[in-house]
Amino acid sequence: MRIAFFDAKPYDKPSFDRYGQENGITFKYFEAKLNEDTVDLAHGFDGVCAFVNDTVNAAVIDRLAEMGITTVAMRCAGFNNVDMRHAYGKVHVVRVPAYSPYAVAEHTMALLLTSIRRIHKAYIRSRDFNFSLSNLTGFDLHGKTVGVIGTGRIGRVFVDICRGFGMQVLCYDKFPYEGLDNGDTIRYVELSELFEKSDIISLHCPLTEDTYHLIDADSLKLCKRGVVLLNTSRGALVDAEALLEGIKSRHVGAACLDVYEEEGDLFFEDKSGHILEDDTLARLISMPNVIVTSHQAFLTEEALENIAETTVQNLLALQNAGQCQNEVCWRGGEAKDCKDGKCF
Ligand code: NAI
């Protein structure tokens, strides 16, 4: 089997080459992102492998189908960049539902600690032999209340980590996880209560029609003054302009963002020699209390191994059985609608 691998980065290749060779799959790596202009690179291949910032829209899906390509292997969990309604009946879309919830949850805590203990400032100071502690005062996490929105695989690991720090946890999920609420230190509450009572809010839900701009001017108004916002899920969960206003008005105490709504042409790339066109992002990055990492939360050795292994198994399952448990839209099925990762 030959797979056209889009948006390839050097760190993708070792694990994909190894699992591919062991299973008779050849990956051809293209640095280009998959979109309407690049889709023809897949001509003659058996499938495409895409990532979070590739565009699998109606035009791309139609062109893939025209070229006889019916497999789209997403090497990520989220698939909000795939037009699922259009994909249905035309291509198989498989994904990697979980590669390392620990990687993302641990990165979230790393961002939080960096931010509130001013590590990003202290690191730069001590490299310049500036050993002053002025303006580096942080606060204890112990005893603080964290609101966790989305208690799936990653959210639950983050809850565990927060409990390790002695924090009170308020959870919100459209589909609460049975057994997580202990009636004491971990409680499910309504979203409005979570906004009102949390010192820190961390987003771990998928991007859907329901969750688009979940954090906007209105929800920020409900939050405590000084709230710390963590987003390692999807950029469009947060209205970045509203967040910027919240930072400027001092209502938001700090923000840690691993994702950004308009990250598509920026994140994962070296733009250091360029003028950043996105004023909102530039202004956010310029703030002393905002930390931005470029969709890095997943990037651990363990996660890269799991991504490659599961993607190869997904491809083999489609080749051998014509279906796969990690399929999100079944080409031959009867699904009518797709929402929150499930087809109905
Ligand atoms: P998951 O599917 O295990 O959990 C998602 C949870 O969100 C579920 O419990 C679901 O019921 C809940 N949910 C769905 N709709 C909701 C709504 N409207 N309001 C509140 N909760 C809702 O997913 P997992 O593995 O925990 O991943 C969470 C998100 O993390 C993914 O959707 C993805 O966007 C993001 N992610 C980010 C990565 C990064 O590198 N920054 C890497 C991997 C995932």
Image (spheres, rainbow, N blue to C red):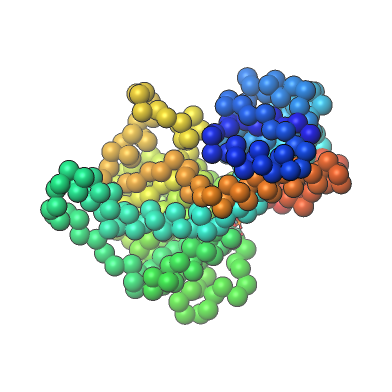
Q: Quadrant of residue 241?
A: top left
Where is residue 60 drawn, in percent x and y? 69, 27
Name which residue lies at 52% across and 70% down.
Answer: 188
Quarter containing the N terminus:
top right
Q: How many marks?
A: 0
Between 308 and 250, which is closer to the camera in this rendering? 308
Vertical placement of residue 104 versus 199, above or below: above
**Can residue 78 be seen by looking at this rendering?**
no
- Indicate the quadrant of ligand 1 in the picture: bottom right
Look at the picture and state if 270 lies above or below 204. above
At 76% from the left and 42% from the top, the residue drawn is: 23
Relative image position of residue 154 (x, y in whole percent): 54, 59
Q: Position of residue 98 (x, y in %)?
A: 62, 54
- Tell me, yes or no, if residue 281 can be seen here: yes
Residue at horizontal 41%, vertical 43%? 293
Q: Quadrant of residue 322 in the image?
A: top right
Q: Would residue 339 appear left or right of 121 to someone viewing this image? A: right
Task: Give the image location of residue 102, x and y in percent.
Answer: 52, 59
Q: Give whichever of 179, 300 is nearer the camera.
A: 300
Q: Front-most of 112 and 192?
A: 112
The residue positioned 61% from the left and 26% from the top of the image is 30
Q: Nearer the viewer, residue 151 or 13?
A: 13
| 203 in relation to 244, above or below | below
